[in-house]
Image (cartoon, coloured by chain):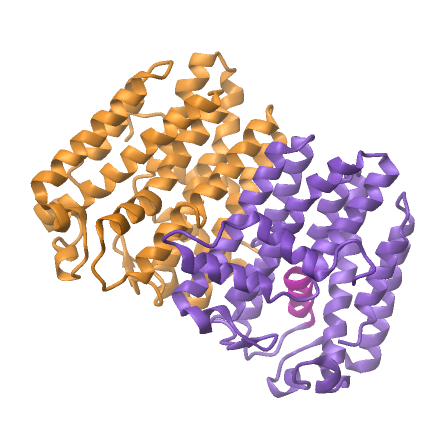
Chain colours: A orange, B purple
Amino acid sequence: MSDYHYDNSEVDSLVKEYLPPVKGLQTTVIRAMDEAVENGGKRIRPIFMYEACRMFAEACGEEKDQWISDIAPFMAAIEMIHTFSLIHDDLPCMDNDTLRRGRPTTWYTYGEAMGVLAGDGLMLEAMTAAGKCAADSSNPARAAEAVRILGEKSGPRGMLGGQSVDVEMTGKPLTEEQLDFIYRLKTGALIEASLMIGAIIGGATQKEAEIMEKIGSCVGIAFQIRDDILDETSTAEELGKPVHSDEKNLKTTYVSLFGLEKAEAEVQKLSAEADALLEELPGDKSTLRGLIGMLVDRKN
Amino acid sequence: MSDYHYDNSEVDSLVKEYLPPVKGLQTTVIRAMDEAVENGGKRIRPIFMYEACRMFAEACGEEKDQWISDIAPFMAAIEMIHTFSLIHDDLPCMDNDTLRRGRPTTWYTYGEAMGVLAGDGLMLEAMTAAGKCAADSSNPARAAEAVRILGEKSGPRGMLGGQSVDVEMTGKPLTEEQLDFIYRLKTGALIEASLMIGAIIGGATQKEAEIMEKIGSCVGIAFQIRDDILDETSTAEELGKPVHSDEKNLKTTYVSLFGLEKAEAEVQKLSAEADALLEELPGDKSTLRGLIGMLVDRKN
């Protein structure tokens, strides 16, 4: 995504700015947090957040230095929360994964206790970064609302609520309602948060932030269905990870419930819905529209 | 502590106000969070926070309805964070405890994965409550600073940093430096946060908040040394839990390093230091002084 304002390595440095220095008696847990952040993926959430913020800030005539410094800690915070969720997902009591993106998972390197603590640490540093931002912000009320959204969309009403149903239903077939709930919360909620927080810091109204929330929901679900499709249709070479894993694990997916054709149609429908919602908003929508397109039509 | 403004059961209801209703597909994780909060202890942290806030708010002439509604979500948040830390401490990969205050621990009732998630959920709901408070507050900048303190004092620079060293050193003898670090961070940091947040929401200056931080540090360490002393000198009947557990577990404590006499002297020294610091502050210090005395001289 290097044609956008932030690429992966820039997000990497940004997050590290908000983490404690790797020193002190508690070096191990900080190093574990640090390495987990380094082993990052597409950095979708902070990049979406940035672009959402830019779109509104430019349309509202916000001062550039100000909105850039106001949004940065939230970009770091949402990536920390995403990383915390991956660290805990990999734990022996959850997915019991020893590798992530070709590298040993946190618990596999540092032990299970340190895996739990490194995840906890990233979550708490996310709160610290967000709080610091709010306190230093030119508009602390806006930033405080962003803190609330970050907590709510990450917690049991959001991502964690989806994860808890996923954990409870492991090995059991899912109903359509359960699958939809998991996709909407586990994947969708943090993308909703990214777009909403970007919008609010950029000066969006409450109503505009709600439209961004709906866009985030469409994008999150489409993203997850695309994942299901790629697992079925891609090769291990293209995808960079094993394919047909859902079928092997007897996992209920959108594809297993409705078939490939309907899955593809649903992605297109959700993508069109996101586009239409975007049209209701002010400012230059081209970058965000491009990002959404890349994400839902991706090949890996 | 029923002679203070909040007693245990009131804190219980207060925390529950900020938790999601026990319903929805994610009922299990919310119920686990709820029950962990119900199985509460002395509620020291929210009560300290309330009294610190009252002391400054009265001295600064803050409007009563306002400061009470501003401090409430932070009282809930700090108790949620304390409870999250207990849930994760009890996990099989940490202390592997099956009972807490005579009731089955969260992971023992709901399984290890749900234990991790219930802890995570409480931490994220703490952020939600704090953010919501800050957004609705009459003084969002003050509340945002409180969010930052809550994150920092809970995370790797605070409580979690202490816990990570404790975990790494399990089964090994501690040096004085390590023991001091663990007491200061694992126990002290959240008490510092309670007093600082109370002070800031109550209208304290930066310098006054720093004095409250020092008081919190003294009280936290004295509280922990008192724990060590009681484990050595009390009976199981008085204490309500097994005694001599530190000796049995070959745990380094202040008592094992320095002996009972020096431990008792250190508690009195820290307590006197807290009292002297309190004298530098405005307002009616009697309630806070009484609370500190109760805590460090307690019999169980």
The front one of A215 and A138 is A215
The front one of B227 and B263 is B227
Identity of the residue drawn at 63% across and 62% down: B186
- Residue A43 x %, y %: 34, 38
Magenta: main secondary structure equals helix
Say if the magenta span includes residue B87: no
Q: Which residues are magenta?
A: B176-188
Q: Quadrant of the C terminus of chain A?
A: top left
The front one of B72 and A133 is B72
Identity of the residue drawn at 57% across and 44% down: B129
Identity of the residue drawn at 67% across and 50% down: B75
Q: Visible in this render: residue A19?
A: no
Res. B79 image quadrant: bottom right
Say if the magenta span includes residue B180: yes
- Residue A94 x %, y %: 34, 63
Identity of the residue drawn at 27% across and 26% down: A274
Is residue A135 shown above or below A280? Answer: below
Q: Is residue B52 left or right of residue A188?
A: right
Q: Quadrant of the N terminus of chain A?
A: top left
Q: Visible in this render: residue B123?
A: yes
